[in-house]
Image (tube, rainbow, N blue to C red):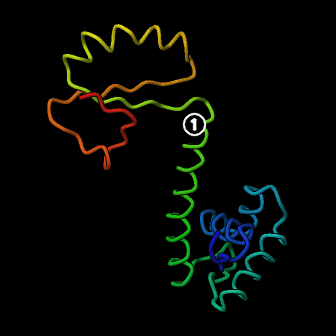
């Protein structure tokens, strides 16, 4: 499976992300459905683990330090990838999308007239037909089937 990942617990990272987004530990706690002391404790553990200060504590709320900004940017990118993977898994669980590429003539005169039958046989499948008169790079394009 490969080497074990060396990242802090996800609950610490999510508390940090919520506090950064809301600029407040209390608002982050409300968003996460937990208490303000729990958010504060998770962030304190995260800062101790990383050996950096991620927030400047202000009278009203918090402000990210430069190290906090760097971590937040990486988290946003990583969480975006996780969101995409979750959505992709959902699509596959529902039957997913079948992407077919072919030329216009084959699509118009043979493939498209048969799509209603496919819809009856597999209603959970979403079929996407891409027509092109030039060759597509099936390694780079999100294509499942190419009919040439």
> Residue pushed farthest bottom?
51
Place of residue 23 in the rendered image (x, y in percent of width and height, measured from the top left): 63, 68
Q: Residues within 10 Å of mark 1 (few under 14, many from 20)?
A: few
Residue nearest the viewer, comparing 120 with 36: 120
What residue is shown at x 26% (from left), y 27% (from top)?
102
What residue is shown at x 35% (from left), y 29% (from top)?
100
On the rendered structure, is 126 left or right of 6? left
> Compared to 119, does 97 lie above or below?
below
Q: Quadrant of residue 59?
A: bottom right
What residue is shown at x 44% (from left), y 30% (from top)?
98
Place of residue 69 in the rendered image (x, y in percent of width and height, measured from the top left): 52, 77
What residue is shown at x 55% (from left), y 17% (from top)?
122
Q: Quadrant of residue 62?
A: bottom right
> Compared to 140, does 26 lie above or below?
below
> Compared to 16, does 129 lie above or below?
above
Place of residue 10 in the rendered image (x, y in percent of width and height, measured from the top left): 71, 67
**The C terminus appears in which quarter of the rendering?**
top left
Residue at mark 1: 92
On the rendered structure, is 73 left or right of 51? left
Question: What count of labels does the image hold?
Answer: 1
Place of residue 65 in the rendered image (x, y in percent of width and height, measured from the top left): 55, 83
> Compared to 75, does 89 lie above or below?
above
Q: Quadrant of residue 106?
A: top left
């Amino acid at each position: 499976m490969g080497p074990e990942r060396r990242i802090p617990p996800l609950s610490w990272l999510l508390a940090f992300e919520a506090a950064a987004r809301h600029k407040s530990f209390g608002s982050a706690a409300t968003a996460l459905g937990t208490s303000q002391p729990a958010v504060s404790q998770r962030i304190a553990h995260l800062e101790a683990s990383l050996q950096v200060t991620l927030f400047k504590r202000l009278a009203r709320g918090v402000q990210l330090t430069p190290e906090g900004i760097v971590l937040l940017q990486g988290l946003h990118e990583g969480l975006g990838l996780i969101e995409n993977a979750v959505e992709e898994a959902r699509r596959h669980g529902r039957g997913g999308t079948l992407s077919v590429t072919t030329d216009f003539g084959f699509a118009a005169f043979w493939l498209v007239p048969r799509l209603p039958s496919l819809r009856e046989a597999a209603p959970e499948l979403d079929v996407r037909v891409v027509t092109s008169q030039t060759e597509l790079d099936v390694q780079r394009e999100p294509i499942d089937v190419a009919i040439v």
